[in-house]
Amino acid sequence: MIIPTFRRPNELLEAIASALGQREVSVEVFVIDDSPEGSAEAVVRGFKDPRLIYVKNPTPSGGVPSIVRNIGWPSARGKFIHFLDDDDIVVEGHYAAARAAFATDPSIGLVFGRIEPFAQRPSEQLEHEQRYFNEAARKAALSQRFGSRLAFVGRMLFDNALLVCSSSVIRRECVEAIGGFDPSIRLMEDADFHVRAMRAFGVRFLERPAIRYRVGAPSLMHSPDPTAEQRKSELSGRRQMQASYRRRYGPIEFYALAFFARTILLFF
C-alpha cells in the first residue's frame, strides 16, 4: 500500500491504522511524506510496526499527488498495490475481498468497491457526496454487464468518474506496465490512471464498501456549487485524459466509445 501525505497527522494516523488492521492478508505500507519538514515521520515511528515504511520526498512536489504516488510503488514488494489517500479509511475486509476477486478472475488487473462518504456532522456537501457515490456505484454495477473493460472506460472518459484512487486495488505488474501516474495531469490524474488500467487489463466492481471517504472542504471534483476555476481545472484534466486515450487507441475507438457512452449507456 502507498499513502502519499502532506501535513495531516491525525487523518494519517487513522488511515494507517485501517490498513494495518486488515485481517487475512499480508500488508506492507509505504508512507510518502511530501512536506518539506517531514511532518509525518513522528506518526509513522509511533506505530512501531515493521510493516510500516516511512519515505520522505527529497524534492517536495508542491501538491502533485501523481509524483508522490510514483515515488512509492516501485519499492512495493507485494502482488497488489493500493493507493490510499491520507484522509481516507480502508473498510475492514476490503483487501481480503479484493484478493478473492483477483483469484476468481486472474485475467483482470483492477478491482474497486463502493465509497462511503463521512463527515463530523451532517452537511450539504456530505449529502451531495453520498448521492454522487451512490450513483457511481449504480453505474459501475450496470457497466459490469457489458464486460470488464469498454463500458467502464466509456463512463470514465465521458461521464462522471466511477471511483476515487483509494477505492481500488491493482496488480503490481499492471502498474508497472502502464507506468504509474501521469504527472502532467494535475486534476483527474487518478481517473486517467484508472482508465489506462481498465482498458489494458480489465476491471471488476465489488458490490461492497471499500473505503470511508472523508468529506472536508468542498471537493474539487464533486462540489455541489463549483467555482469557475474549479470547472476550468476539471475540464482541463478531462481533456488531457481524453487526448491521451485518443493518441493511444486511435480516433475510431475513441469516438465509438463516446457514442456508446452518450447513447446506449444513458439507458443503463
Image (cartoon, grey):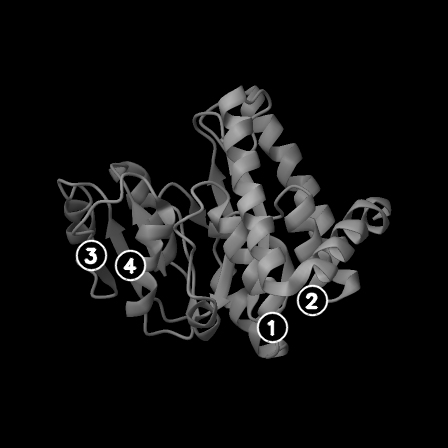
Amino acid on which disc 4 is placed: Ile
Q: What x and y, as percent, mark residue 48?
A: 17, 58
Amino acid on which disc 2 is placed: Ser
Say which element carries label 2: loop
Q: Earlier in the sequence, mark 1 or mark 2?
A: 1
Q: Which mark is residue 71?
A: 4
How packed mark 4 is, by other alpha carbons closer than 10 Å (few <14, some 14-19, many 20 or more), is: some
| Cα–Cα gap, marks 1 and 2 | 8 Å
| Cα–Cα gap, marks 3 and 2 | 35 Å
Amino acid on which disc 1 is placed: Ile
Which residue is disc 3 drawn over? Answer: 54
How packed mark 3 is, by other alpha carbons closer than 10 Å (few <14, some 14-19, many 20 or more), is: some
Which residue is disc 2 drawn over? Answer: 148
Q: Earlier in the sequence, mark 4 or mark 3?
A: 3
| Cα–Cα gap, marks 4 and 1 | 25 Å
The label nearer to you, 3 versus 1, is 1
Q: What x and y, as percent, mark residue 253?
A: 72, 61
**Proximity of marks 1 and 2: CB atoms separated by less than 8 Å:** yes
The label nearer to you, 4 versus 1, is 4
Q: Is residue 137 left or right of residue 179?
A: right
| Cα–Cα gap, marks 4 and 2 | 29 Å
The label nearer to you, 4 versus 3, is 4
Q: Earlier in the sequence, mark 4 or mark 2?
A: 4
Give the residue drawn at x 34%, y 64%: 73
Q: Nearer the viewer, residue 211 or 200?
A: 200
Q: Nearer the viewer, residue 235 or 171?
A: 235
Q: Which mark is residue 108?
A: 1
Amino acid on which disc 3 is placed: Tyr
